[in-house]
Image: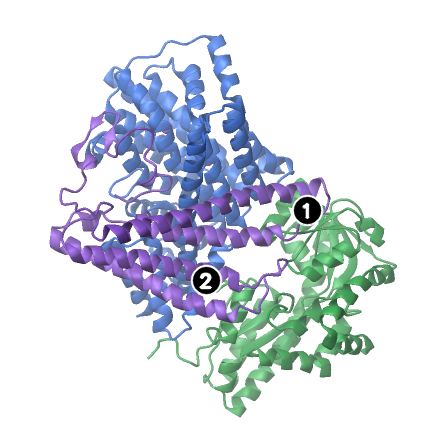
Chain colours: A purple, B green, C blue
Amino acid sequence: MSAGPSVPGPEEPRAGRAPGEGVFGEIPELAEPKPDVIAPPFPALDRAMGALARVCMAVAGVQIVALVLLMGWLVFGRYVLNDTPTWIEQLAILLIAWITFLGAAVGVRDESHLSIDFIRESLPPVPRAALRVLADVMVAVFCGLMTWQGWKLVGTNLAREIPMLGLPEAWRYAALVAFGALGLLFVALRLAQRAVAPTRSLPWD
Amino acid sequence: ASPLAAKDWRGWNIHPPTYPNGIALDAFAEKVAEATDGRVTPTVYHNAVLGDQPDAIEQTRNGALDFGNFNMGPMGPIVPATNILSLPFIFSSVDQMHKVMDGEIGQRFSDALAEQGLVALSWFDSGARSLYNTKKPVKTPADVQGMKVRVMNNQLYVDMIGALGGNATPMAFGEVYQSLKTGVIDGAENNYPSYESTNHYEVAGYYSITEHLIIPECLCVSTASWEALSDEDKAAVKQAAVEAAAMQRELWAEREKTSLEKVKGAGAQINEVEDKAAFQSAMDPVYAGFIEKNPELKSWIDDIKAVK
Amino acid sequence: MGLTLLFGVFALGLIAGAPVAFALGLAAVACFAYEGLPLFVAFQRMMSGVSTFSLLAIPFFIFSGELMLHGGIARRLVTLAAAAVGSVRGGLGTVNVASSMLFGGISGSAVADTSALGSILMPVMKEKGYDADYAVNVTVTSSIAGIVIPPSHNMILFAVAAGGGISVSNLFLAGVMPGILMCLCLMAAAYWVAVRRGYPAETFPGWRALALSFADSLPGLMTAVIIVGGVLSGVLTVTESGAFGALYALVVTGVVYRELTWTAFRAAVVSAVRTTALVMVLVGCASAFAYMLALYRVPEQLTDLLMGISQNPIVILLMLNLILLALGMVMDMAALILICTPIFLPVATGIGMDSIQFGIMMMMNLGLGLCTPPVGACLFVGCVIGGIRIEQAVRTIFPFYVAVFAALMLVTYVPAISLGLPSLLLE
Ligand code: NA
Ligand code: NA
């Protein structure tokens, strides 16, 4: 099932109800979506990646709260001080880039990005496994390209300043590199985990 | 074998195809195809569908695009010398700007652009930007005192409003109309055609002819695309660009007139600013700060001011 | 050939179940490579797509919605709606729709609406003897109100995808009447089904109880007043009003209602980051994709194609609706707004439709897509919370589809429904 926006992620199940347990009674295929689930191989690495994803989420969380407070300060400056803090708009846009790409990296780890997987998941185990690998490889290629080209953009934007902020534009593009590298780490581990038992499902499939 | 062959030039334009710039660029494309016997066939992508201006400049420098019509305002972060053109009251009039840019000083700007991979073939007009607001006619700098004025994202414009005692508020262009209407901001600044086409005159009826910013635009070709041309084709393209600029300036002047008539007809109050010198002298700290940061550009400023 | 590559890579990614955003991005990058264009441009477009000031409001609306969901505002709105309209036959169905009008008018997200109101209302409906499929059907279809009634982050996405020339405040205003109209149609459907199934009516709790629950939910309702009123009064821009909505929701849920625990606050922050990131990364990748659509002149070609089939505006609008409905069945909303707006909007304006009316039509149309199989986030979430299989829900959902579709047709062919309010209030 494709996770839509606002669906609680793995670390915050909605108030005391197990996944798949509905208010009208339990439904087998939602409670245990895949009968062939294995525990994630390489548990130590898996825990490490989980911790890394939580760090990313914490940083992005602080940034989103900062964003709300900054907008409050902007309005205070415009009306009360009659001196608009002109750096806030650009800083806010820089922050949103970091929130987006850090959050998107966490999304790679959680598999919470919007996707259409009803076709794949209704296939027999072997083609299903092949498509899962293909999807992961596409994510890996995308993240790899992002890291490489993002790094290039960081290099070419070291001297260019973000107007009103005085920071190099490179700070913006660094978010692409962070996303690419983190996403690559997360998806590489998943591909390795898949290789251990190719036709079985991982818990988050 | 790419289907977009090298001779198929792609060009960038922020304006709609019916704007003076769009018409002139389409004429440029047609002229180039004709004069090079189809060895170069340009297509103009209007309405900024290939990205905003900073991105399009990067793309042109790197050969993803072949040419574009760029305003010198957002060029500053890439070609620092062009920041001079964003200094308030750097030109005394649009005619003087034409004289400067078509002459030796314009060539200096072309050379600075060339160092960054852009060949400036001719200079377009974007008129003179003046202040407009929702409150009253601006006649002296004191009238700007305490006014919340939207400016483009550039420290020089912020400093300019600050030097007049106003509250400079950078804001996305798309939010300006609503913000003027509801009073989030009191004013903004732009040329007649923008003042009219954005309908800002409906909500901010006082337009004061301060003409504080006169920023030229270039018709620039990417160095890579330029160097791939034969000398004969270079001459043809250059000629087409110069003709396009003449056409654009003429269409621009006409457009300014029709825009002015339209906003006047709609009840906007246009006022002359008698004592422009007061505004100019208020800019002294802006110039001082600029020269302190860019001492090597002081002579450029002096040379521009010397052109009558 | 380039166009085949663009859509081929995209389709391959979709079939493999890769994230829609990355499938879009990878398809664009493949075309950049194929055309011999520098690859960095694709990634520069992704960054520029995200770095747009108008989009800043999105995390704020999402954050406000999450705070209300975790901090007790949503529950009070349900109580208020129950007190007000619960005495109608099959009352809880009507309550469900009315709650969505109130809550959707604040949260701006259909899925948040489904999960918030579904979690609160479905257990109550079950207790009172309503069938699970009915509860799920009403909950998911009425959650479309979250998109159509302002504020709505999907409308901001539309305004951005349309090229930035559309006023978000006008769009917001334009959504009010269509949202109410759609909810009225859904109430009619809910009533009709309830009567046929013999569901009971609630007893009216009395004016005093109604007044009390109104007073109790008033601080929460004020969030909507702050967000929409901030913009209309001219104190705040859309973006700032979003931020103030979040700040205000924080105060109400934390200080007034005292229901926002540290855990709930963290959950709201995490959900806000996740949703923001998923939507915004789609925006970024879609801009790289849109670069290629523009380069290959897809909008112009499609316009010619559709105009070739028929010149009749009524037929063209019907075709646009059917195409959007079909796409909405298999893809999620945000991606479709970003991909389809630049392609379809010129067609609609070409036959004289106002861009704002088109936007509202698109919101409602794609909202319906969220409630249809095989891909429909609201339907999925509703079924999970309701604890029924998707087939069970879909078997009886038809009357509700008809209700939304009827409203959609009215909005499509009667401009005044969407454009009346903005022209009344803003002229
Ligand atoms: Na809403
Ligand atoms: Na509902």
State the count of labels: 2
Chain identity of mark 1:
B
Which subunit holds the residue at mark 2?
C
Please provide percent x and percent y for residue A201.
18, 48
- Give how far apart the Cα atoms at labels 2 and 1 are: 34 Å
Element class at badge 2: helix
Q: Residues within 10 Å of mark 1 (few under 14, many from 20)?
A: some
Where is residue A180, by image quadrant? bottom left
Seen in the image, is A25 located left or right of residue C340? left
- Both on one chain, marks 2 and 1? no
Task: Point out which mark residue A99 bears.
Answer: none
Q: Quadrant of the C terminus of chain C?
A: top right
Closer to the camera in the image, A8 or C327: A8
C106 up-or-down from B280: above or below:
above
Name the disc covering residue C45, or none. Answer: 2
The extreme bottom residue here reads B231
Q: Quadrant of residue B262?
A: bottom right
Q: Which residue is mark 1?
A: B202
CB of residue at label 1: within 8 Å of ligand 1?
Answer: no
Q: Kindly identify the residue that appears in the image at 42 percent across and 9 percent down.
A: C205
Q: Residue at x 64, y 50 (%)?
A: B199
- Inspect this view and state whether residue C140 appears: yes
Q: Secondary structure at mark 1?
A: helix
User: Is B96 rendered above or below residue A14?
Assistant: below
**Taking B39 as reference, is A4 left or right?**
left
**Figure check: A153 above or below A188:** below
The nearer-to-camera label among 2 and 1 is 2
Label 2 with label 1: CB-CB less than 8 Å? no
